Image (cartoon, helix red, strand yellow):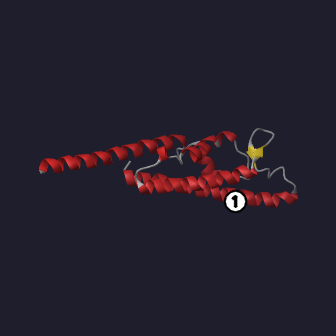
Amino acid sequence: MELFLGYLVNILSFGYVKRREADIELFRELYSELSFNSDSAVLLRDHDFSNVFPPSYLPPLNNISEDWLYENAKFHSCLVEYRKKKFLEHLTCFIDELSQHTGMDNNGMLSIGLHEASQKEKKRKKKVAKTINELSSKAYRSYERFVKSYENELNA
């Protein structure tokens, strides 16, 4: 009987260890695409979208919003998975809004065109910039919550 219980505990704990290791590896993969000090994370956290920014900051965000919805990028921890989904939801909302209002300027930077707008258009463009700033902040805060839940849940 003791042998059976020991075997059962071994199987159950082995499964937990493997799931935890898989979650840690999955998180490392995502974090390598979007670390807190990366250009893309700084764009989400600090950028004022009434100003221009380099287009090279967006591909990591686009990759995350597209690639991290699939089943092979699912965390075993329910809380971490929930926070990841919330982050992706906020990130996708930000990217969608940004893509509707930005274009390439003469210097090869992306912009909502506030500085080139007529006086009539400036008011509308300022509202757009405010909305995009709010969405980027919301996405970044959601990313922070995701990372904190990962650290708390997996003690990593």
State the residue position of label 1.
131
Place residue 67 in its image quadrant.
Answer: top right
Place residue 97 in its image quadrant.
Answer: bottom right
Query: Whole-percent x and y of residue 95?
Result: 65, 50
Image position of 56 with respect to 91: above or below: above
Image position of 40 with respect to 135: above or below: above
Q: In this image, 95 relative to 117: left or right?
A: left
Q: In this image, 24 relative to 36: left or right?
A: left
Q: Which residue appears at 57% of the width and 42% of the height?
A: 38
Neighbor class of circle 1 (other Cα within 10 Å; few <14, some 14-19, many 20+) is some
- Viewer-proximal residue among 96 and 145: 96
Q: In this image, 63 relative to 84: left or right?
A: right
In the image as oriented, which residue stretches furthest toward the left? 1
Q: Amino acid at mark 1?
A: Thr
- Viewer-proximal residue among 36 and 12: 12
- Viewer-proximal residue among 118 and 11: 11
Query: Whole-percent x and y of residue 100?
Result: 74, 52
Q: Which residue appears at 46% of the width and 42% of the height?
A: 28
Query: Whole-percent x and y of residue 105?
Result: 79, 42
Q: Which residue appears at 78% of the width and 38% of the height?
A: 107
Q: In this image, 146 relative to 123: left or right?
A: left
Q: How many marks?
A: 1
Place residue 78 in its image quadrant.
Answer: bottom left
Tell me, yes or no, if residue 48 can be seen here: no
